[in-house]
Structure formats: C-alpha cells, structure tokens
Image: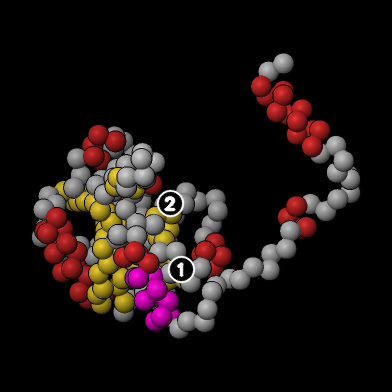
C-alpha cells in the first residue's frame, strides 16, 4: 500500500460517521467575526498603518502627490541606485526625468538580470493598517511578483487614504482571489535558524513605503 492510499484510507475512516446530508463546512461555520477592531477615522487608520509598518522595520515616508518625484529621486540617490526596475504601468510622473537608468519589466528577464537591479518602485493594491501589510496583485503599476522578490530594495507607493483599509477582512473584499497576490509585512526576514533574525532571505532587505496623499 502506498503512502497516498494510507492517507486517503484514514480520511475515509474519519468521515465514516458524517451524515450525507450534513451542512457544508462553508455554511456550518459562523462568519460573525469582527471586520475591524475599534472605531477609527480615515486619518487614524493611516496613522496605524504607518506605526505598524515601522514596527515591521519598513522605512515610512510621507508626501503630497506633487512632491513624489523629488522624494523618490532622493531615496534612490541615498541608496546609490544606478538601475531602477519599473513595472509597465507605473504612472509616468512618479519618477523624475533625470536619475537612475530605468529597467523595464520584461517576461524574458532572468533572475540573474533582475538581481543586478539596484531598486524597484511599485504601487500597491491595498494596505492593511491593523497588520502593517501591503498587498500587491500584479496590476500594471505593480508588475509581476518576481520583480518585487529579487531586487534588494523595494519602494512601494501607497495612495492614502484611498488604498488603506483597517483589517484583513476589508482587504479581502477589495481583492480578486484569482490574481497573483503578494502579501508584504516588512522586509523579507526569517528567524528559522537559532531564532536569529536574518533579512533578505526571500525578498528585499530594505522596504521603503511612501504614503502619498492628495491624489
């Protein structure tokens, strides 16, 4: 008997006493959990997002829409970035005309080529205040998943307050589960080995988040 057959046999035995007419799990389980914790204004929700992003060791910046190109240019210069990866639908006014060489996201780009890029700049689909989480869904201003996992420096622009929600249930209501969702809570890190935190294991070591208002 194979391992697969043994596992399926155990499942059948566990389900042997379940009536055939029992309500499906999706109907039987109550869904009365809270959709958010507390009563906050839009401004307070944005402040909570900023606090939790910083708690996850993301670097948080704030700007009006008109100041975004100058801020991004300053952040890239401070990083010493010479090549910046841009998704195909990044708004053209976000990056200043002068600055690092722009590398466009191409399907033919290899992991080695993407690893030679200094920084990547993207938008996001939604940001969750209670968990300090950014969600990317592969939209044109975010690009494919791998462009935010391979470069060592990621700058993510969040339109506030429009793209900020309080909780995970609220975020799920805005997202399409059929899209390639990437959930980001701070720089990539793990503590698997002797509980020592190591950053940059399966994503960027540095995450900078720009909260942009006035859009």
Q: Quadrant of residue 46?
A: bottom left
Residue 182: mark: 2
- The quadrant of the image that shows the C terminus is bottom left
Q: Are marks 1 and 2 in contact (CB under 8 Å)?
A: no
| 176 versus 200 height, above or below | below
**134, 84: nearer the viewer:** 134
Q: Is residue 123 visible?
A: no
Residue wearing tag 1: 130
How dense is the environment of label 2, judged by Cα within 10 Å: few (below 14), some, or many (20 and up)? some
Percent position of residue 191, x then y: 37, 45
**115, 18: nearer the viewer:** 18
Q: Which residues are magenta?
A: 42-51
Rendered image coloring scheme: secondary structure
Label 1 SS: loop
Label 2 SS: strand
Percent position of residue 149, x then y: 33, 45
User: Which residue is at 15% across, 69% downward?
Assistant: 70
């Amino acid at each position: 008997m194979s391992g697969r057959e043994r596992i399926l046999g155990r499942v059948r035995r566990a389900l042997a006493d379940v009536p055939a007419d029992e309500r499906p799990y999706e109907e039987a389980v109550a869904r009365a959990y809270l959709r958010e914790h507390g009563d906050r204004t839009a401004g307070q929700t944005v402040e909570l997002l900023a606090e939790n992003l910083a708690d996850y060791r993301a670097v948080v910046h704030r700007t009006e829409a008109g100041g975004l190109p100058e801020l991004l240019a300053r952040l890239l210069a401070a990083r010493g970035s010479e090549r910046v990866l841009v998704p195909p639908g990044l708004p053209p006014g976000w990056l200043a005309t002068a600055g690092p060489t722009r590398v466009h996201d191409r399907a033919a780009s290899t992991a080695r080529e993407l690893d030679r890029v200094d920084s990547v700049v993207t938008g996001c689909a939604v940001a969750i205040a209670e968990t300090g989480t950014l969600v990317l869904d592969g939209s044109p201003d975010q690009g494919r998943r791998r462009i935010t996992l391979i470069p060592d420096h990621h700058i993510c622009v969040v339109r506030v307050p429009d793209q900020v929600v309080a909780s995970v249930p609220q975020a799920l209501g805005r997202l399409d589960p059929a899209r390639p969702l990437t959930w980001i809570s701070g720089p990539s890190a793990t503590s698997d080995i002797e509980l020592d935190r190591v950053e940059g294991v399966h994503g960027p070591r540095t995450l900078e988040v720009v909260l942009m208002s006035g859009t």
